[in-house]
Image (tube, rainbow, N blue to C red):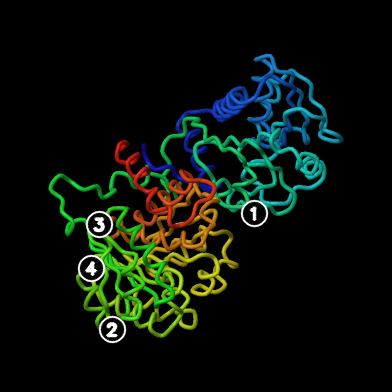
Amino acid sequence: MTARPILTVAEMGAADKAAIAAGTPGVELMERAGLAVADAVTQRFDVQPVLVLCGPGNNGGDGYVVARLLKARGWPVSVRALGEPATPDAQAMRARWDGETLPLDGALGEALVIDALFGAGLSRALDGAAAHAAALLASRPETVVAIDTPSGLPGDTGQPLGPSFIAGLTVTFHARKPAHVLEPGRSRCGEIVVADIGLGATPSTLFENGPELWRARFPWPSASSHKHQRGRLIVVSGDAWSTGAARLSARAGLRIGAGLVTIYAREEALAANAAHLEAVMLKPYANDLELEQAADQADAAVIGPAAGVTETTLLNVLALARTGAALVLDADAITVFRDDPGELFSVLDRDDVLTPHQGEFERLFPGLLKAAPERITAARRAAAKAGAVVLLKGADTVIAAPDGRCAVNINGSPWLATAGSGDVLAGFIGGLVSQGMDSFEAACAAAWIHAEAAELHGPGLISEDLPGLAPTVLRRLYEER
């Protein structure tokens, strides 16, 4: 399978127009869309009364198709219309509907509701009867099926401008839109079905993060591989009382395939680390110059987990940047540059990876999130500014490269909301980068594997569990390669 694009509203419109220009009539595309929704409904629900809410545009046209097809399959169907159809294709589909049609007003009853009022292109707040319907249905999203996006949810941002529908099932076409992958839109869509309506391939630099995006370049060992060929990763430890985070990163790097993983620690932290390490090696360093010399033989370096927001951490980052190792900067290694982000950006290159959560992102890129329409744009601007890969953590983790490539995680897990999980993610990234994987793809693969591992465990997960869960995910990827 090829990587699955995420399309903006404009890109989706262009794909529709290209298909029509190539000879597929708009009414045929509408028929295919309505059929996909009707099939999704009949596969998930028993026969019951259905109320289809139709808007004046092509989303409403899809709704008339759904109404006709469900009625033909024996479902009791009625339509509530928000005005007359305003597009030729919607008018054609309204003419083919021979059932009951009433104005959209008043109570909606207890029927299964098909939301065909407005699609992803709506850029204003719902008002009037549409807003009233959204309020009436807000307490029972499991009985709402949205066509394209829940009405009131702009497709390019996923940020409602006012009242919006909340669906238990959303059927969209050809590709997800940003509203399907970014919060809060993602949560308002419920289950998302992406239906193929025959539009063909669409160029994009924004993708769903999944194995299709990076599986072909995952660094599996060959029969002749040895540990020195499988990547040399170093992790910088915190002080004597803050060593656990580095060990989490190191163990994660080892589990994901790095051949040699070494923790570098100051003398006072050696004993604390030594008491807990087996396959991960441990070496001392006295200052940033010694760390620089050590890292010059490494393929990748992780620094930041519990490193301390200190001058020592700042000097260590600058020292590592002078080596040939690709850097993975997390937590304190990000925050320590909050007073002069430009100093950090001046030493980074495109193979380095920054892994901020929202607060850390704001420290490095003040005001950027607020100024951007959504997290995808913010992460892309940040990657371009830093000249490095940026992984913006969250329920809707976004990974952006300085060349414009971007991916959004759609398998995020609530079980990752536990101390230390970010340290493991940094180690996964470092382990893959050390094996020669492109840094953007390594960050994408690590984020996906991280979430899959969390889902394998579920309730009760702690960060120490994650490295040990990775092999099950890796075996599945290996068998599917």
Asked if disc 2 and disc 4 are in contact, CB closer than 8 Å, the reply is: no
* Image position of 388 with respect to 134: above or below: below
How far apart are labels 4 and 3 at the CA level? 11 Å
How far apart are labels 2 and 1 at the CA level? 50 Å
| Mark 2 vs mark 4: in front | 2
Residue that numbered label 3 is attached to: 435
Disc 3 marks a residue whose amino acid type is: Gln
Task: Name the element at disc 4.
Answer: loop
Dot placed on the residue nearer the N-terminal end, 4 or 1: 1
| Mark 2 vs mark 1: in front | 2
Along the line of sight, which residue is nearer the eye, 19 or 452? 452
Q: Residue at x 32, y 53 (%)?
A: 256
Residue that numbered label 1 is attached to: 159
Residue that numbered label 2 is attached to: 286
Residue 169, picture quadrant: top right
Along the line of sight, which residue is nearer the eye, 44 or 73? 44
How far apart are labels 4 and 1 at the CA level? 43 Å
Disc 4 marks a residue whose amino acid type is: Ala
Badge 4, how many Cα within 10 Å: few under 14, some, many 20+? many
| Mark 3 vs mark 2: in front | 2
Dot placed on the residue nearer the N-terminal end, 2 or 1: 1
Asked if disc 4 and disc 1 are in contact, CB closer than 8 Å, the reply is: no
- Circle on res. 298: 4
Asked if disc 2 and disc 1 are in contact, CB closer than 8 Å, the reply is: no
